[in-house]
Amino acid sequence: MTSNSRQETFIEQKVTYTLEMEGKFFIIENVPARVCVETNEQFFSPETVERIQQTIWGKEKPKRVIETPVYEFTAS
């Protein structure tokens, strides 16, 4: 039996996780993830997801705050 599915390769690396919630953006740096080499898709362990939620919902003091410009896309 021949399979057409491809072998995906994952690497462990630190990524930047972004989230928009209630009109606010949150950025968490240096999050451990498994990243697919072919698609760049990121996978997080349940423990990592729980820690991200605790960080944002627990309203921990951020390392720094950045200002971000916002643009609206308009078709020409």
Image (tube, rainbow, N blue to C red):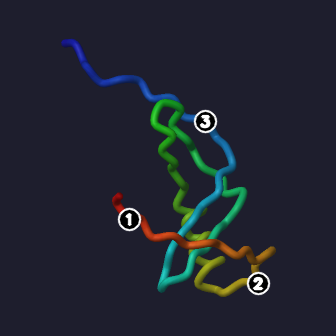
- Label disc, if present, on residue 45 of the rendered structure: none
**Which residue in the structure is indicated by mark 1?**
74
Left or right: 65 with respect to 12? right
Check disc 2 and report its element: helix, strand or loop: loop
Q: Mark 2 points at which residue?
A: 61
Q: Is residue 51 visible to the viewer in this orientation of the structure?
A: no
Q: Which amino acid does label 2 sit on?
A: Lys
* In the depicted structure, whether residue 38 falls above or below residue 34: above
Binning the other alpha carbons within 10 Å of mark 3 as few (below 14), some (14 to 19) or many (20 upward) gives few
In the image, is residue 63 above or below residue 61?
A: above
Say which residue appears at 56% left-offset and 70% top-offset.
50
Q: Closer to the camera, 12 or 41?
A: 41
Q: Which of marks 1 and 2 is nearer the N terminus?
A: 2
Q: In the image shown, does 69 or 21 lie closer to the viewer? A: 69
Label 2 crowd (10 A; few <14 / some 14-19 / many >=20): few
In the displayed orientation, state which residue is furthest to the right: 63
Residue 11, labelled with which disc? Answer: 3
Amino acid type for the residue under numbered disc 3: Ile
In this view, the mark in front (3 or 1): 1
Could you tell me residue 32's position as x and y percent? 66, 52
Residue 13 left/right relative to 2: right
Going 55% across and 72% down the picture, which residue do you hit? Answer: 70
Look at the numbered disc 3 and give the secondary structure of its residue.
strand
Q: In whole angstroms, how far apart are the C-alphas of marks 3 and 1?
A: 38 Å
- Three-letter amino acid code at the position of disc 1: Thr
First of labels 3, 1 by sequence position: 3
